[in-house]
Amino acid sequence: MRELTSFYTDAFVIAVKSILEHKLRAFLTLIGIIIGVAAVVVVGASIAGLKTYVIDRVSKVLGSEHFMITRMASTGRMSDEEFERKNRRNRRVTWREFQYLRENCQTCSYVGAQVADNADLDRDGVEMPAVSIRGVTPEMLEIESKDLEEGRFVTAQEVESSAPVTVLGADVRDKYFPVGSALGKEIKLRGVPLTVIGVEKARGSFMGSPMDRLMYIPISLHTQLFARESGIQVHASALDRDKFPEAMDEATVLLRNYRKLTGSEEDTFSLVNTDEFNSQMDQFTGAIAAVVIPITMIILVVGGIVVMNIMLVSVTERTFEVGLRKALGASRKQILLQFLIESALLCICGGLVGLLVATGVVALITIIAGMTMTITPGYIILSIAVSSSIGIVAGLYPAWKASKLDPIVALTLV
């Protein structure tokens, strides 16, 4: 055991000395490995950052651990046949069904309702077209995790009385009330003057669509101002993360029972949740990684070819050393391992440098683009494992060639 440890220690020391004796050559040799590892890590961080960014934006729109029941909805692509079948079968969700779910769903922390339409605003000749008008119940504040910059949200009493009040999105507030507080001021919607009771914090945009170009009003007032034929959306959140699937199942069973559906009959409504979107994002980012990562690894393959070439040069340069070691009793296996260790160490150094370069690039992109990019442990392990594997594979033939040298012939080639 002591002899084995001594051999590997000596081999490591010799490998380090060999690399340090030719610093410039080692650096130029490893440029391909450095760029390849940096590319793999940066691409991985970009994919992870994209997923985090999109999920964060969706959470700001929909809230987390949140599901929705409505007549027609889907998080994925729906075929024409499936759409036609659901369009014929599904029935609109009614206000009574919302009340039934709110009263009976035991695993739901909040059950709310929402409807949405677009309208053009005009105040003192200042127009703002295509503003999203959302009729809501007070529970939507908690379900969608809304943050208010000032004021308050719609109350249950205002829903019952169809009170002419509104909560503005940041874009609408900036358009009509850029100076001072908007609270207590009036804005007309379809000729009805609404009193501003709150302003939502700015949420930015999502996939190029603004998330602040909207107004919230009591859902009862919304039904008076807009003709609704497709029913309402019922939104709900679970008591905690562990009860989320149970809450969805309970809500589904409750609505099926209310509609008197038997066990063999399909649902006559649609249910979507944020977890489905997260799963789709996993598939989407996984598909991107499956295509992009192998392409970036081509750089590592090219770097491995360069390493193999330099290791062949190193074997030629150290022919006398190899012959002397074999003459003193070194076995073919020891010679083979010596050059493999040197090649692997060379590539591991390149992988570590590439990792440092990737960290700098990721930090720079995060500052410039404003999107948080995360270097995940998986990509770190992958980069180091791949770079060391390339070092072993690239050094295999040169090491084998060195181990095959005849010591007599090697000692005469001085």
Image (cartoon, rainbow, N blue to C red):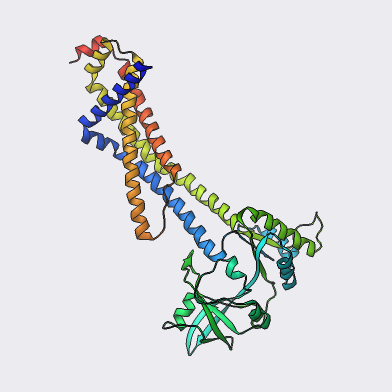
- Residue 5, given in percent of the width and then of the height, sits at 35, 20
In the picture as drawn, the residue positioned furthest to the left comes out as: 414
Residue drawn at (52%, 64%) of the image: 60
Residue drawn at (29%, 27%) of the image: 311
Q: Quadrant of the C terminus?
A: top left
Residue 290 vertical placement versus 154 (above, below)? above
Q: Quadrant of residue 325?
A: top left
Q: Quadrant of the N terminus?
A: top left
State the residue in front, 1 or 403.
1
On the picture, is 52 further left or further right than 309?
right
Residue 382 vertical placement versus 313 (above, below)? below
- Residue 84, given in percent of the width and then of the height, sits at 70, 62
- Residue 402, given in percent of the width and then of the height, sits at 30, 19
State the residue in front, 302 or 319.
319
Q: Quadrant of residue 412?
A: top left
- Residue 93, given in percent of the width and then of the height, sits at 72, 69
Task: Confirm whether residue 207 shows in the render.
Answer: yes
Residue drawn at (82%, 62%) of the image: 260
